[in-house]
Image: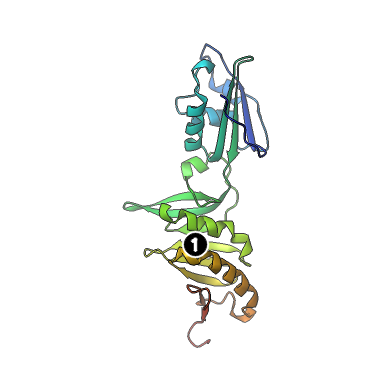
């Protein structure tokens, strides 16, 4: 394949000395093939298993572009580049893993489905995510749906700039976003995505300016649906 290699450092490289004409691989041989790179979480065997019928085949019958697409579907990776070299016969597979940072729930017809989200808010099924050791995750997203992937991704991207650890994102049935942070508790953002950038900046500022006595108080709600007019709603009798 003449596919250009990714310009940024590769997180994972699988190099398999591949049979040129005879499909004589055995599972134990595949598992023992050399893997090198910045990540050891995807084994050579898991890559072959993810090939979905494309692997194992003889080298001459492997279509690098088709294999790249299959690996992107079957593995928790955001980039896959496949190189087929004839002399010596070898198959090089470069993979860049997704950063999995949130557990998520979505409604699938009449049942709730569990998954994992990457740093851009994309859904990754658990069966795919579980192919690597999932890091410790402290964020949950409830009510995820594809039409809100961009907004969820933006919140996740800015999670370290909010001034307080993000614990939960909820997408309500009417499309309103609700956050929960460690210090401020429930934060209502509303359903207007055009305000999101301004709301996230306001949230970071309010985390510094709101008196400590009002933080982490059960029943307190911070409403920044209008980021120019934030409202701190206290439980009855504490206003």
- Residue 35 horizontal side relative to residue 180, left or right: right
| Residue at image point 37% right, 63% down | 173
Confirm whether residue 139 shows in the render: no
Q: Quadrant of residue 167?
A: bottom right
> Residue 68: where, in percent of width, then height?
51, 31
Observer-nearest of 121 and 167: 121
- Residue 14 horizontal side relative to residue 146, left or right: right
Looking at the picture, does residue 148 appear above or below residue 33? below
| Residue at image point 48% right, 45% down | 126
> Residue 114: where, in percent of width, then height?
44, 50
Observer-nearest of 78 and 32: 78
On the rendered image, what quadrant is the N terminus found in?
Answer: top right
| Residue at image point 62% right, 81% down | 213
Q: Which residue is mark 1?
A: 169
Count of marks overlaid on the render = 1
Within-10-Å neighbours for mark 1: few <14, some 14–19, many 20+: many
> Residue 196: where, in percent of width, then height?
51, 65
């Amino acid at each position: 394949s003449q596919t250009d290699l990714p310009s940024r450092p590769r997180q994972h490289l699988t190099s398999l000395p591949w049979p040129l004409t005879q499909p004589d691989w055995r599972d134990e041989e595949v598992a023992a093939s050399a893997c090198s790179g910045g990540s050891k979480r995807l084994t050579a065997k898991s890559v072959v298993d993810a090939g979905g019928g494309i692997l194992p085949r003889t080298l001459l019958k492997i279509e690098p572009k088709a294999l790249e697409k299959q690996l992107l579907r079957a593995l928790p990776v955001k980039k896959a580049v496949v190189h087929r070299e004839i002399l010596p016969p070898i198959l090089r597979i470069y993979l860049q893993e997704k950063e999995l940072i949130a557990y998520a729930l979505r409604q699938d017809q009449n049942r709730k489905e569990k998954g994992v989200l990457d740093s851009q808010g994309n859904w990754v099924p658990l069966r795919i995510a579980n192919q690597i050791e999932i890091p410790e995750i402290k964020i949950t997203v409830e009510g995820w749906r594809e039409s809100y992937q961009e907004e969820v991704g933006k919140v996740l991207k800015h999670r370290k700039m909010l001034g307080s650890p993000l614990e939960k994102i909820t997408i309500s049935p009417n499309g309103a976003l609700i956050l929960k942070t460690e210090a401020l508790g429930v934060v209502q953002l509303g359903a207007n995505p055009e305000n999101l950038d301004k709301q996230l900046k306001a949230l970071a500022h309010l985390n510094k300016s709101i008196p400590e006595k009002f933080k982490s108080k059960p029943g307190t709600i911070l409403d920044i649906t209008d980021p120019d007019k934030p409202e701190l709603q206290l439980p009855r009798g504490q206003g």
